Image (cartoon, rainbow, N blue to C red):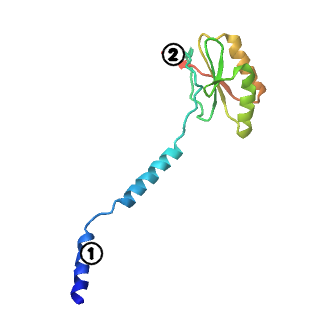
Amino acid sequence: MARGFQRQRANQGEASGEINISPLIDVVFILLIFFIVTTVFVDETGVQVDKPRAATQQDIEKESILIGITAGGSVYYGGREIGIGGVRAIISRLQKEQQRPVVIQADRETDTSKTIEVLDEAKLAGAESIFVSTVASD
């Protein structure tokens, strides 16, 4: 009976030489989830515009509302065409959560009157800071 106990104990000693990597894999997955959740994603207008050039330029907050205006005069937010009438509704809804700057990304070929209409709708929706997006000149 004592021999059976010793044989079993000897086999346990051999198995302890292996390294269990399960906890390491768990930690790696937890870190991966942490970095994915804490990553800040920047919203885009969903439309490609050719921005005008400007000599002065400044960076703005990441938490801004981006409104895009194409060369044809279509107004976009979040990849959807909203038209001039949708600007006020969207901005007022987003301003209720917290005050954010509004950035108008108008194509350089856009009619100035269309950009002014979008700017007016943003002001009427309660936006305090409104910017026009440009590209730095060379």
Q: On the rendered structure, is 52 left or right of 118?
A: left
* Of the pair 79 and 124, the residue shown nearer to us: 79
Q: Quadrant of residue 17?
A: bottom left
> How far is the residue under mark 2 from the one under mark 1?
73 Å
Q: Where is residue 131 in the image (x, y as percent from the top left)?
A: 65, 24
Q: On the rendered structure, is 5 left or right of 123?
A: left
* Of the pair 77 and 101, the residue shown nearer to us: 77
Give the class, few, some or many, for how many residues have Cα within 10 Å of label 1's Cα (few <14, many ≥20): few
The residue shown at (70%, 20%) is: 83
The residue shown at (69%, 29%) is: 129
Q: In which quarter of the image is residue 107?
A: top right
For residue 47, above or below residue 12: above
Q: Position of residue 48 (x, y in %)?
A: 55, 19
Q: Which element type, helix, strand or loop, lies under badge 1?
A: helix
* Of the pair 90 and 60, the residue shown nearer to us: 90
Q: Which element type, helix, strand or loop, lies under badge 2?
A: loop
Residue that label 1 marks: 12
Q: In which quarter of the image is residue 109?
A: top right
Question: Residue 58, can we see it?
Answer: yes
Residue that label 2 marks: 137
Q: Position of residue 108 (x, y in %)?
A: 59, 12
Q: Give the mark toward the camera: 2 or 1.
A: 1
Q: On the rendered structure, is 11 left or right of 20?
A: left
